[in-house]
Amino acid sequence: MTQSTPSGDNELLGSAVAMRKISRLERFLGPEGYRILQGLFKTPASIAGFSLILLFILVALAAPVLAPPVTPNDPYKIPRDGFKAQPREAGSEWNKNVPDIPFWYKAVTGNDKWVHLFGTAQGQYDIYYGVVWGARTAFNTGLIVVLSTLFIGVVVGSVSAYYGGFVDNVIMRIVDVLMILPGLMATLILAAVLTPVIGRSLLPVMISLIAFGWMGYARIIRGDILSVKERDYVMAARVIGVKDSRILFRHILPNAIFSTMVLASLDIGTVTLSFAALSFLGIGVEVGYADWGQVLAFARNWISSLNTYWYIIVFPGITLVLFVMGWNLLGDALRDVLDPRMRGKM
């Protein structure tokens, strides 16, 4: 707690003594970091986004408890109850390859036998397993792809903006050429080429999404750095002989990264949707892998009968929508907190 005693005859100053206590968290984060954290937990959008994301984190962490894997060596493989094409409704009895019953099951459902909680899809793939273990797939793909594209984009855009001139022109023309290509189509083609080489797994689609996903970050960080690098503290660092790498990564990037971080938080949901779309088209993971896009793909032959088999698209579809919504709400809230025009309105 800090307190200063005024001097002189100023009675107004004497009644305006500062008495605000600075917490350990504020000292650790600094004034700006503490303001951002405080703003995020004050907006309804961010609270809703955090709640949704926390829910999916808990589901992903508790997946072995919520849905015990039938094959421990390959937990992402969705168990099958036979091979019939026709889906079965939610609550139908499990007959073949019955998983171990978890400790919570009887207390929650009141049933001694394991049933298909969300029904089965075409080929008798259990939808509940696909939804639960698909949360881990969504986090794996979304976070890895976004962090990789963010790193590449920030490095490329920073180098381009800081050195300028010929370096900037060459890098930005390469970015312009790559951005002309239709993103999803280019990703689809590259993933289709890589799949026979690498094999059916998460890698072909993830590599393709990274290859065509970093350009937006490069352009945004370049524009922000161009405005920051002419400020007085950067010019002073150059005058005293500070190395370029230290100026860039210590003084410029921390003050120019906010817009890029907002885009990254929004892109986690976008990447998840893109991965689900490619999986729906049959690119990437093998059939039966726990991925929301593939669970939705099982419904392709039953679209005309969704009035009866609604559950094969409703459960994975709502899960995917809520996951993307959580990240979008968090990104919107982060944008509002970091926008200088919104200060004082939070």
Image (cartoon, rainbow, N blue to C red):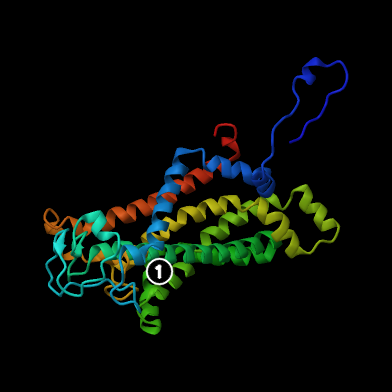
Q: Is residue 338 left or right of residue 285?
A: right
What residue is rendered at 14% in x and 56% in y? 306
Examine the rendering and report whether any part of residue 81 can be seen: yes
Q: Quadrant of residue 278?
A: bottom left
- Residue type, mark 1 in image: Thr
Relative image position of residue 133 (x, y in whole percent): 34, 65
Q: Residue at x 49, y 38 (%)?
A: 43
Q: Which structural element holds mark 1?
A: helix
| In the depicted structure, whether residue 41 falls above or below residue 91 | above
Residue 338 visible in the current orientation: no
In this view, the residue in front, 268 or 73, is 73
Q: Which residue is mark 1?
A: 187
Residue 197 position within the rendered picture, expressed as x and y whole percent measured from the top left: 39, 84
Furthest residue toward bottom: 197
Q: Quadrant of the N terminus?
A: top right
Rendered location of residue 266, percent (x, y) = 46, 53
